Amino acid sequence: MGEEDYYLELCDRPVHFEKANPVNCVFFDEANKQVFAVRSGGATGVVVKGPDDRNPISFRMEDKGEVKCIKFSLENKILAVQRTSKTVVLPEKRNLKLLKSQNINVNWYMYCPEGAVILLSTTVLGNVLQPFYFRAGTMSKLPKFEIELPAVPKSTKLNLSERDIAMATIYGQLYVLFLRHHSRTSNSTGAEVVLYHLPREGACKKMHILKLNRTGKFALNVVDNLVVVHHQDTETSVIFDIKLRGEFDGTVTFHHPVLPARSIQPYQIPMAGPAPVTSQSPVPCKLYSSSWIVFQPDIIISASQGYLWNLQVKLQPIVNLLPDKGRLMDFLLQRKECKMVILSVCSQMLSESDRAALPVIATVFDKLNHEYKKYLDAEQSYTTALEAGQSRSSPLLKRPVRTQAVIDQSDMYTHVLSVFTEKDVPHKFVIAVLMEYIRSLNQFQIAVQHYLHELVIKTLVQHNLFYMLHQFLQYHVLSDSKPLACLLLSLESFYPPAHQLSLDMLKRLSTANDEIVEVLLSKHQVLAALRFIRGIGGHDNISARKFLDAAKQTEDNMLFYTIFRFFEQRNQRLRGNPNFTPGEHCEEHVAFFKQVFGDQALMRPTTF
């Protein structure tokens, strides 16, 4: 299998620690994401490492017996060590205060640091779960809920193991994930993962069922809001996205894997040791090893090899594994690092080899612009609230975060559309795609940027489709704008009606004439500016120097000659002499004209 087929990988900079052995015990703290390597009960050293720690923490402590558990408080301020089932020791003497106590018979517990929720397994079968929520030094009891077991238990012993339960935040909501090894329905074979939504207020509710269609040993991770299910027997994994449309039966939504099952990408363990020795080739890592331990949300630990990895999703391979472009977009738009992949999909669907049908392209544009519009609306609401002074009365007012899912017009223009129009593609398809994107923007009431209209016009002109251009302007398919009007003025020599179309547009925009001239000159459209000013009869009062400056900047000597000659003729007509007066400050332009064309090219005064 090529690298382009693997959509899951282990991070390339894992945490490396001393592997577990009879002398060295390894512990993992899920809250701080730290690995503790405890040698000889701590007497010969404790080394603490985390994914973000630049410098590991090392210390020693007295060997007072086997360590069952060891953890730091947040920010590594207090160390707690557990050596017996009933005592926890703080190496530093501190006063502890009992804030609250609950009397419950507990089979096992699970803590979710991201949600600050502890889950207690109660009752004989263990399937009634009691959550508690910690916030600002207080503990709140949330409503308990029952996990539906696969079938009516035959015995009254513990049926729900903590191995089959996980807690994770998915799309900002806390879920309890239950790995049910046998489906409750007789017609369905294989295991499933049941997702219970655990809100801060209100009852826990069963929301989603992920169909695995296989049995065996499983492990769960959550990466980039995707539920990843690892299957040890086949050494493969599948991913589920609960935001994608599933089958709703009125109570829960059933989901199938987004993609075919694939192994995690093969991983090479670099050889440690002195430099001369490390020239040996790296050792392949045994994936899906029985010594792997999985922690939430995205951690995989191999205690026997001494590595902690973060699991990662690779988006680019998914592009070719998910042929339905609409579903692919729904999937990609929810991912953290999606922008460049989405833009590459857009380019791909317009390419000759993978060209998509126009309705598919329209669907993709609509999905992108739906997301874009949501962001623009949120930004607008924020600005309005800010101007109304609500930020002082509402401290919760936050500027909307621009995620990578926001693909705006400049992104599409730069990375997709401008590149696409330069390729050897049938012009009808090019125009259809551009108009489809503009249609989608209009549908979501997003103001179309002038450079998109310019791209349409340039494409039409390039293929001499002036009748179509005329229609687009006549029926206001292309929105009025000053840059667009200037572009039309510059097209007059190819298409004479463009001059009038441009003037009509500028009048509709109530643009001042001198502003139009300034815009045209700034775009080096010197002749167009002159034609415009002549068209409105203002050419006797314009500054010769301004036009000569602009003509000279174009570095087009023949253009400079034409403009210079026009003003000589104006001078002759108005004053009876072609020469410029000192007040016009054109001396440098006269000198330049003589230098390029010679003295004899200057107009001579006409005598009658």
Image (cartoon, helix red, strand yellow):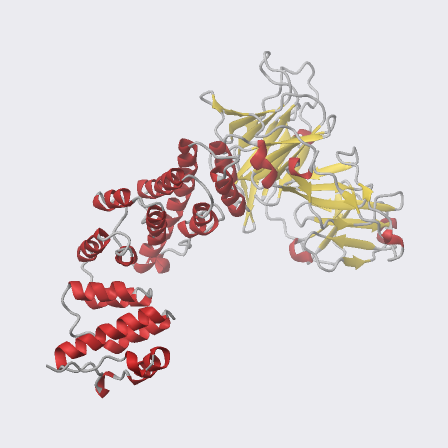
Kindly indicate the quadrant of the structure image that contains residue 305: top right
**Residue 118 seen:** no
Q: Residue at the spot x=52%, y=27% of the render?
A: 206
Q: Position of residue 600 (x, y in %)?
A: 29, 81
Q: Nearer the viewer, residue 473 or 178?
A: 473
* Quarter the N terminus occupies: top right
- Judge from the rendering whether residue 598 lies leftward or rightward of residue 543; answer left or right: right
Q: Relative to residue 281, is residue 294 depicted above or below? A: above
Kindly indicate the quadrant of the structure image that contains residue 429: top left
- Judge from the rendering whether residue 233 lies leftward or rightward of residue 212; answer left or right: right
The residue most toward the bottom is 582
Q: Position of residue 287 (x, y in %)?
A: 76, 36
Q: Nearer the viewer, residue 364 or 401?
A: 364
The residue most toward the top is 187
Q: Residue at the spot x=72%, y=50% of the render?
A: 13
Numbered circles on residues, count: 0
Q: Position of residue 459 (x, y in %)?
A: 36, 47
Q: Residue at the spot x=59%, y=41% of the render?
A: 316
* Quarter the C terminus occupies: bottom left
Q: Position of residue 249 (x, y in %)?
A: 47, 20
- Judge from the rendering whether residue 437 lies leftward or rightward of residue 80; answer left or right: left
Kindly indicate the quadrant of the structure image that contains residue 586: bottom left
